[in-house]
Amino acid sequence: FLGFTFKPRQVKSRYGSYFRGYLPGMSRKAQKRVRDTMREWGLTSHITLWSLNKVAAFINPYVRGWINYYGACYKEPLREVLNHVNALLVIWAKRKFKSFNRSRWKARKWLKAVAKRDPHLFAMWSMNVRP
C-alpha cells in the first residue's frame, strides 16, 4: 500500500523491552523502483566528469525525498537502498580517479574519509548510512 509493506517486525518499547509489532516498511516493489531510478542516473558512466559536490547536488533531492517518505516508519529496508547509493558512489570514484581504478577497497576508504570529514555532504550520510 503506497510503497509500504505491513508485517511483523522487532520493535523496542519505550521501557527498553522488545516485542513484535506490525509496522510499515518500504516494500520490495518500492525498493526496486528506487534502484531503477538510481540506474537511470547513469552515475557510473557519463557523470564521471562531475565533481563530488556536483554529484551530491544532483543526488541529494532524490535521497531526501526517499528519506522523508519511506523513513517515517521502519527504516531498515530504506537503509539497504541507501547503502546501494554508497556502492554506486564507490564505483563512481573508481571510474573518476585513476588511482582507484583497480581497487574498490581504496575507493571505499577514500569515500569513508570524505564522509568523516564532511558528514552532511550527502543526505544519507547525515542519517548515519555511510560507506
Image: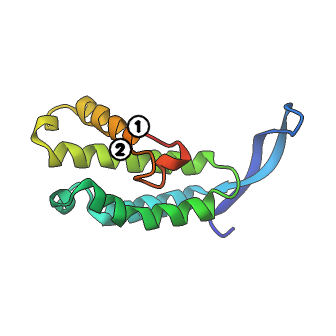
State the CA–CA distance, disc 1 to disc 2. 17 Å
Most distant residue in the left direction: 98
Instruction: Rate crowding at label 2 as few (under 14), some (14 to 19) or many (20 or more) other CA atoms within 10 Å.
Output: some
Left or right, residue 13 beside residue 102: right
Left or right, residue 26 beside residue 94: right
- Say if 100 sits above or below 93 in the image: above
Q: Which amino acid type is shown beneath numbered disc 1?
A: Lys
Q: Secondary structure at mark 1?
A: helix
Marking on residue 87: 2
Q: Please give the name of the residue rendered at 47% of the width and 60% of the height, measured from the top-left corner.
A: 63
Q: Which residue is mark 1?
A: 116
Q: Quadrant of residue 104?
A: top left
Q: Secondary structure at mark 2?
A: helix
Q: Please give the name of the residue rendered at 41% of the width and 47% of the height, measured from the top-left corner.
A: 84
Marking on residue 85: none
Most distant residue in the bottom direction: 2
Q: How many marks?
A: 2
Instruction: Rate crowding at label 1 as few (under 14), some (14 to 19) or many (20 or more) other CA atoms within 10 Å.
Output: few
From the image, state whether disc 1 or disc 2 is nearer to you.
Answer: 1
- Residue 37 at x, y = what percent? 40, 65
Q: Please give the name of the residue rendered at 52% of the width and 57% of the height, measured from the top-left corner.
A: 31
Q: Which amino acid type is shown beneath numbered disc 2?
A: Ala
- Residue 11 at x, y = what percent? 79, 40
